[in-house]
Image (cartoon, rainbow, N blue to C red):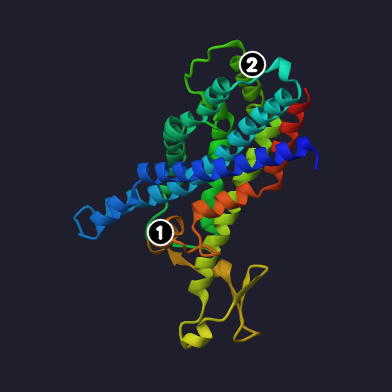
Protein backbone atom coordinates (compact mmCIF):
# COMPACT_ATOMS: atom_id res chain seq x y z
CA UNK A 1 0.00 0.00 0.00
CA UNK A 2 1.38 3.38 -1.01
CA UNK A 3 1.93 6.12 1.53
CA UNK A 4 -0.65 8.31 -0.21
CA UNK A 5 -3.30 5.60 -0.12
CA UNK A 6 -2.63 5.01 3.58
CA UNK A 7 -3.01 8.72 4.26
CA UNK A 8 -6.28 8.89 2.29
CA UNK A 9 -7.72 5.90 4.16
CA UNK A 10 -6.74 7.54 7.44
CA UNK A 11 -8.51 10.72 6.28
CA UNK A 12 -11.57 8.64 5.36
CA UNK A 13 -11.69 7.05 8.84
CA UNK A 14 -11.38 10.47 10.48
CA UNK A 15 -14.15 11.74 8.22
CA UNK A 16 -16.50 8.87 9.12
CA UNK A 17 -15.82 9.24 12.85
CA UNK A 18 -16.44 12.99 12.67
CA UNK A 19 -19.66 12.45 10.71
CA UNK A 20 -20.98 9.95 13.26
CA UNK A 21 -20.14 12.24 16.16
CA UNK A 22 -21.59 15.43 14.68
CA UNK A 23 -24.65 13.64 13.25
CA UNK A 24 -25.67 12.70 16.79
CA UNK A 25 -25.21 16.30 17.95
CA UNK A 26 -27.21 17.64 14.99
CA UNK A 27 -29.98 15.09 15.60
CA UNK A 28 -30.21 16.02 19.29
CA UNK A 29 -30.36 19.69 18.34
CA UNK A 30 -33.21 19.11 15.85
CA UNK A 31 -35.24 16.99 18.27
CA UNK A 32 -34.70 19.60 20.97
CA UNK A 33 -35.87 22.50 18.80
CA UNK A 34 -38.85 20.50 17.51
CA UNK A 35 -39.89 19.00 20.83
CA UNK A 36 -42.95 16.84 20.19
CA UNK A 37 -42.78 15.30 23.66
CA UNK A 38 -44.10 18.51 25.24
CA UNK A 39 -47.19 18.45 23.01
CA UNK A 40 -47.76 14.72 23.60
CA UNK A 41 -47.59 15.35 27.35
CA UNK A 42 -50.25 18.05 27.08
CA UNK A 43 -52.48 15.79 24.96
CA UNK A 44 -52.39 13.11 27.64
CA UNK A 45 -54.24 15.52 29.95
CA UNK A 46 -57.12 15.73 27.41
CA UNK A 47 -57.15 19.55 27.29
CA UNK A 48 -59.83 21.73 25.68
CA UNK A 49 -57.41 22.79 22.91
CA UNK A 50 -56.73 19.16 21.95
CA UNK A 51 -57.47 19.74 18.25
CA UNK A 52 -55.07 22.70 18.07
CA UNK A 53 -52.36 20.60 19.73
CA UNK A 54 -52.85 17.79 17.19
CA UNK A 55 -52.55 20.35 14.39
CA UNK A 56 -49.24 21.54 15.89
CA UNK A 57 -48.07 17.96 16.27
CA UNK A 58 -48.68 16.99 12.63
CA UNK A 59 -46.62 19.98 11.44
CA UNK A 60 -43.83 19.23 13.91
CA UNK A 61 -43.57 15.52 13.05
CA UNK A 62 -43.21 16.16 9.31
CA UNK A 63 -40.84 19.07 9.95
CA UNK A 64 -38.68 16.83 12.15
CA UNK A 65 -38.34 14.21 9.42
CA UNK A 66 -37.62 16.71 6.65
CA UNK A 67 -35.07 18.65 8.71
CA UNK A 68 -33.30 15.40 9.62
CA UNK A 69 -33.10 14.46 5.93
CA UNK A 70 -31.71 17.82 4.84
CA UNK A 71 -29.45 18.44 7.85
CA UNK A 72 -27.81 15.00 7.87
CA UNK A 73 -27.28 15.08 4.08
CA UNK A 74 -25.82 18.60 4.13
CA UNK A 75 -23.60 17.75 7.12
CA UNK A 76 -22.18 14.73 5.25
CA UNK A 77 -21.36 16.83 2.19
CA UNK A 78 -19.81 19.71 4.14
CA UNK A 79 -17.61 17.39 6.22
CA UNK A 80 -16.47 15.33 3.23
CA UNK A 81 -15.53 18.50 1.38
CA UNK A 82 -13.74 20.05 4.36
CA UNK A 83 -11.88 16.99 5.60
CA UNK A 84 -10.70 15.91 2.15
CA UNK A 85 -9.51 19.42 1.30
CA UNK A 86 -7.54 19.59 4.53
CA UNK A 87 -6.42 15.95 4.15
CA UNK A 88 -5.11 16.69 0.67
CA UNK A 89 -3.20 19.73 1.89
CA UNK A 90 -1.70 17.78 4.81
CA UNK A 91 -0.46 15.05 2.48
CA UNK A 92 1.09 17.69 0.24
CA UNK A 93 2.80 19.22 3.27
CA UNK A 94 4.23 15.82 4.23
CA UNK A 95 5.81 15.53 0.78
CA UNK A 96 7.02 19.14 0.54
CA UNK A 97 8.06 19.83 4.14
CA UNK A 98 9.93 23.00 3.24
CA UNK A 99 6.75 24.70 2.01
CA UNK A 100 4.08 24.00 4.64
CA UNK A 101 0.58 25.15 3.71
CA UNK A 102 -1.44 24.07 6.75
CA UNK A 103 -0.32 24.34 10.37
CA UNK A 104 -2.32 23.05 13.35
CA UNK A 105 -3.78 26.48 14.16
CA UNK A 106 -5.07 27.03 10.63
CA UNK A 107 -6.44 23.47 10.56
CA UNK A 108 -8.35 24.05 13.82
CA UNK A 109 -9.81 27.38 12.61
CA UNK A 110 -10.89 25.89 9.30
CA UNK A 111 -12.55 22.79 10.76
CA UNK A 112 -14.28 24.84 13.48
CA UNK A 113 -16.36 26.54 10.76
CA UNK A 114 -18.60 23.47 10.68
CA UNK A 115 -19.79 24.23 14.20
CA UNK A 116 -21.76 27.17 12.81
CA UNK A 117 -23.91 24.71 10.88
CA UNK A 118 -24.36 22.50 13.93
CA UNK A 119 -25.57 25.50 15.94
CA UNK A 120 -27.08 28.40 14.00
CA UNK A 121 -27.30 26.65 10.63
CA UNK A 122 -29.66 23.97 11.96
CA UNK A 123 -31.90 26.64 13.50
CA UNK A 124 -32.12 28.44 10.14
CA UNK A 125 -32.85 25.15 8.40
CA UNK A 126 -35.71 24.38 10.79
CA UNK A 127 -37.37 27.74 10.06
CA UNK A 128 -36.99 27.32 6.31
CA UNK A 129 -38.35 23.78 6.21
CA UNK A 130 -41.17 24.42 8.69
CA UNK A 131 -42.55 27.09 6.35
CA UNK A 132 -42.63 24.59 3.45
CA UNK A 133 -44.16 21.85 5.62
CA UNK A 134 -46.99 24.13 6.75
CA UNK A 135 -47.93 24.89 3.13
CA UNK A 136 -48.30 21.19 2.38
CA UNK A 137 -49.45 19.60 5.65
CA UNK A 138 -51.76 22.24 7.18
CA UNK A 139 -54.56 21.64 4.63
CA UNK A 140 -54.57 17.85 5.28
CA UNK A 141 -57.38 16.97 7.69
CA UNK A 142 -56.53 14.83 10.70
CA UNK A 143 -59.65 12.78 9.88
CA UNK A 144 -58.52 12.06 6.32
CA UNK A 145 -57.83 8.45 5.42
CA UNK A 146 -54.33 8.42 3.94
CA UNK A 147 -52.85 6.02 1.43
CA UNK A 148 -49.14 5.34 1.18
CA UNK A 149 -48.98 7.28 -2.08
CA UNK A 150 -50.60 10.31 -0.45
CA UNK A 151 -48.02 10.28 2.35
CA UNK A 152 -45.27 9.96 -0.24
CA UNK A 153 -46.74 12.91 -2.15
CA UNK A 154 -46.54 15.05 1.00
CA UNK A 155 -42.77 14.56 1.19
CA UNK A 156 -42.21 15.14 -2.53
CA UNK A 157 -44.33 18.31 -2.41
CA UNK A 158 -42.26 19.66 0.48
CA UNK A 159 -39.03 18.83 -1.36
CA UNK A 160 -40.34 20.52 -4.53
CA UNK A 161 -41.22 23.71 -2.65
CA UNK A 162 -37.74 23.82 -1.12
CA UNK A 163 -35.74 23.08 -4.27
CA UNK A 164 -37.69 25.63 -6.33
CA UNK A 165 -37.31 28.41 -3.75
CA UNK A 166 -35.01 30.93 -5.43
CA UNK A 167 -33.67 32.30 -2.14
CA UNK A 168 -34.35 29.54 0.36
CA UNK A 169 -33.26 26.24 -1.22
CA UNK A 170 -31.24 24.61 1.60
CA UNK A 171 -28.86 22.93 -0.86
CA UNK A 172 -27.93 26.29 -2.36
CA UNK A 173 -27.44 27.75 1.13
CA UNK A 174 -24.72 25.31 2.23
CA UNK A 175 -22.04 28.01 2.22
CA UNK A 176 -24.27 30.23 4.36
CA UNK A 177 -24.91 27.38 6.80
CA UNK A 178 -21.17 26.70 7.05
CA UNK A 179 -19.89 30.24 7.20
CA UNK A 180 -22.59 32.45 8.64
CA UNK A 181 -20.92 35.79 9.30
CA UNK A 182 -17.57 34.28 10.27
CA UNK A 183 -14.57 36.57 9.89
CA UNK A 184 -11.68 34.96 8.03
CA UNK A 185 -8.24 36.18 9.02
CA UNK A 186 -5.08 35.19 7.19
CA UNK A 187 -4.33 34.72 3.50
CA UNK A 188 -3.90 30.93 3.68
CA UNK A 189 -7.18 30.37 5.53
CA UNK A 190 -8.94 32.75 3.16
CA UNK A 191 -7.68 30.71 0.19
CA UNK A 192 -8.88 27.40 1.64
CA UNK A 193 -12.27 28.87 2.58
CA UNK A 194 -12.76 30.23 -0.94
CA UNK A 195 -11.87 26.83 -2.40
CA UNK A 196 -14.42 25.24 -0.07
CA UNK A 197 -17.10 27.74 -1.06
CA UNK A 198 -16.44 27.12 -4.76
CA UNK A 199 -16.91 23.39 -4.26
CA UNK A 200 -20.07 23.70 -2.15
CA UNK A 201 -21.61 26.01 -4.75
CA UNK A 202 -20.63 23.80 -7.71
CA UNK A 203 -23.28 22.05 -9.81
CA UNK A 204 -21.66 18.67 -9.14
CA UNK A 205 -21.80 18.98 -5.35
CA UNK A 206 -25.34 20.39 -5.47
CA UNK A 207 -26.41 17.45 -7.63
CA UNK A 208 -24.83 14.90 -5.26
CA UNK A 209 -26.46 16.60 -2.27
CA UNK A 210 -29.90 16.56 -3.94
CA UNK A 211 -29.41 12.90 -4.84
CA UNK A 212 -28.54 12.10 -1.20
CA UNK A 213 -31.65 13.95 0.01
CA UNK A 214 -33.92 12.15 -2.46
CA UNK A 215 -32.48 8.77 -1.51
CA UNK A 216 -33.02 9.56 2.18
CA UNK A 217 -36.66 10.43 1.55
CA UNK A 218 -37.06 7.15 -0.36
CA UNK A 219 -35.69 5.24 2.64
CA UNK A 220 -38.22 6.96 4.90
CA UNK A 221 -41.07 6.10 2.51
CA UNK A 222 -39.92 2.46 2.67
CA UNK A 223 -40.17 2.56 6.46
CA UNK A 224 -43.63 4.15 6.33
CA UNK A 225 -44.65 1.50 3.76
CA UNK A 226 -43.90 -1.12 6.42
CA UNK A 227 -46.43 0.62 8.69
CA UNK A 228 -49.07 0.21 5.98
CA UNK A 229 -47.99 -3.40 5.49
CA UNK A 230 -48.61 -4.13 9.17
CA UNK A 231 -52.08 -2.57 8.92
CA UNK A 232 -52.95 -4.75 5.92
CA UNK A 233 -52.08 -8.04 7.64
CA UNK A 234 -55.17 -10.11 8.58
CA UNK A 235 -56.15 -9.60 12.22
CA UNK A 236 -58.03 -12.88 12.60
CA UNK A 237 -54.93 -15.09 12.44
CA UNK A 238 -53.29 -16.44 15.55
CA UNK A 239 -49.98 -15.06 16.75
CA UNK A 240 -47.94 -17.73 14.98
CA UNK A 241 -49.53 -16.98 11.61
CA UNK A 242 -49.29 -13.23 11.95
CA UNK A 243 -45.53 -13.41 12.45
CA UNK A 244 -44.85 -14.68 8.91
CA UNK A 245 -42.68 -12.62 6.60
CA UNK A 246 -44.29 -10.03 4.37
CA UNK A 247 -43.03 -9.66 0.81
CA UNK A 248 -43.90 -6.62 -1.29
CA UNK A 249 -44.14 -7.43 -5.00
CA UNK A 250 -44.95 -4.55 -7.37
CA UNK A 251 -46.98 -2.74 -4.74
CA UNK A 252 -48.83 -5.86 -3.56
CA UNK A 253 -48.36 -7.60 -0.24
CA UNK A 254 -47.89 -11.34 -0.27
CA UNK A 255 -48.52 -13.06 3.06
CA UNK A 256 -46.26 -16.05 3.57
CA UNK A 257 -48.92 -18.12 5.37
CA UNK A 258 -51.14 -18.19 2.27
CA UNK A 259 -49.08 -17.91 -0.94
CA UNK A 260 -52.07 -16.96 -3.10
CA UNK A 261 -53.19 -14.07 -0.88
CA UNK A 262 -52.27 -10.62 -2.17
CA UNK A 263 -53.15 -7.27 -0.68
CA UNK A 264 -52.56 -4.06 -2.61
CA UNK A 265 -50.66 -1.97 -0.06
CA UNK A 266 -51.43 1.17 -2.04
CA UNK A 267 -55.14 0.67 -1.31
CA UNK A 268 -54.66 0.42 2.44
CA UNK A 269 -55.92 3.55 4.19
CA UNK A 270 -55.01 4.83 7.66
CA UNK A 271 -56.55 7.86 9.35
CA UNK A 272 -53.96 10.64 9.41
CA UNK A 273 -54.37 11.15 13.15
CA UNK A 274 -53.58 7.46 13.78
CA UNK A 275 -50.61 7.51 11.43
CA UNK A 276 -48.85 10.43 13.14
CA UNK A 277 -47.78 8.64 16.37
CA UNK A 278 -46.31 5.63 14.54
CA UNK A 279 -44.45 7.86 12.08
CA UNK A 280 -43.12 9.82 15.05
CA UNK A 281 -41.87 6.61 16.67
CA UNK A 282 -39.71 5.92 13.61
CA UNK A 283 -37.66 8.96 14.64
CA UNK A 284 -37.13 8.27 18.33
CA UNK A 285 -37.61 4.53 18.79
CA UNK A 286 -35.80 1.62 17.16
CA UNK A 287 -38.77 0.61 14.99
CA UNK A 288 -37.02 0.85 11.60
CA UNK A 289 -35.43 -2.11 9.83
CA UNK A 290 -32.34 -3.44 11.54
CA UNK A 291 -33.75 -2.35 14.90
CA UNK A 292 -32.72 1.25 14.30
CA UNK A 293 -34.35 4.70 13.97
CA UNK A 294 -34.55 7.28 11.17
CA UNK A 295 -31.56 9.44 12.26
CA UNK A 296 -29.24 6.43 12.66
CA UNK A 297 -30.56 4.78 9.48
CA UNK A 298 -29.96 7.91 7.40
CA UNK A 299 -26.51 8.50 8.91
CA UNK A 300 -25.48 4.92 8.13
CA UNK A 301 -26.77 5.04 4.55
CA UNK A 302 -25.18 8.41 3.84
CA UNK A 303 -21.83 7.34 5.31
CA UNK A 304 -21.82 4.26 3.06
CA UNK A 305 -22.95 6.20 -0.04
CA UNK A 306 -20.69 5.48 -3.02
CA UNK A 307 -21.41 8.91 -4.50
CA UNK A 308 -20.30 10.70 -1.33
CA UNK A 309 -17.23 8.48 -0.96
CA UNK A 310 -16.24 9.19 -4.57
CA UNK A 311 -16.76 12.91 -4.03
CA UNK A 312 -14.37 12.81 -1.08
CA UNK A 313 -11.80 10.74 -2.98
CA UNK A 314 -11.85 13.11 -5.96
CA UNK A 315 -11.43 16.18 -3.74
CA UNK A 316 -8.55 14.54 -1.87
CA UNK A 317 -6.84 13.64 -5.14
CA UNK A 318 -7.07 17.20 -6.46
CA UNK A 319 -5.77 18.87 -3.30
CA UNK A 320 -3.05 16.30 -2.55
CA UNK A 321 -1.62 16.52 -6.07
CA UNK A 322 -1.77 20.26 -6.77
Q: Could you tell which of marks 2 and 1 lies nearer the N-terminus?
A: 2
Other residues around mark 1 within 10 Å, as few (<14) / some (14–19) / many (≥20)? some
Residue 24 position within the rendered picture, expressed as x and y whole percent measured from the top left: 47, 46
Q: Residue at x 75, y 34 (%)?
A: 314
Left or right relative to 131: residue 266: right
Q: What's the mark number on residue 163?
A: none
Instruction: Give residue 74's quadrant in the image.
Output: top right
**Toward which corner of the image does residue 27 lie, by quadrant?**
top left
Q: Mark number for residue 191?
A: 2
- Residue at 25% of width from left, 57% of height from top? 43
Q: Which mark is residue 276?
A: 1
- For the N terminus, the image quarter is top right
Viewer-side residue, 66 vs 47: 66
Q: Is residue 306 above or below residue 176?
A: below
Could you tell me if residue 159 is visible in this image? no
Q: Is 1 left, or right, of 171 in this rendering?
A: right
Q: Does residue 274 sit above or below 81 in this rendering?
A: below
Query: 10 Å neighbourhood of mark 2: few (<14), some, or many (≥20)?
Result: few
Return the x and y of residue 89 as percentages of the image width and height.
69, 25
Q: 206 or 62: which is nearer to us?
A: 206
Q: Secondary structure at mark 1?
A: helix
Amino acid sequence: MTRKKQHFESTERTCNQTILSLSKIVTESILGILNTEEIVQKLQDNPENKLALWEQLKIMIFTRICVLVYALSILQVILRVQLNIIGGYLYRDSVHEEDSLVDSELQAKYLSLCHHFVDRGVEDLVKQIETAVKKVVEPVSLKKKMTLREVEQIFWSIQTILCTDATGDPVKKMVQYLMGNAEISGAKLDTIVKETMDLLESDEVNSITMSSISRSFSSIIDEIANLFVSKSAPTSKNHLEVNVDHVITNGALKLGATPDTFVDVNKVEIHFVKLLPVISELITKNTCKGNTNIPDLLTQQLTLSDKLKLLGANIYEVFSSA
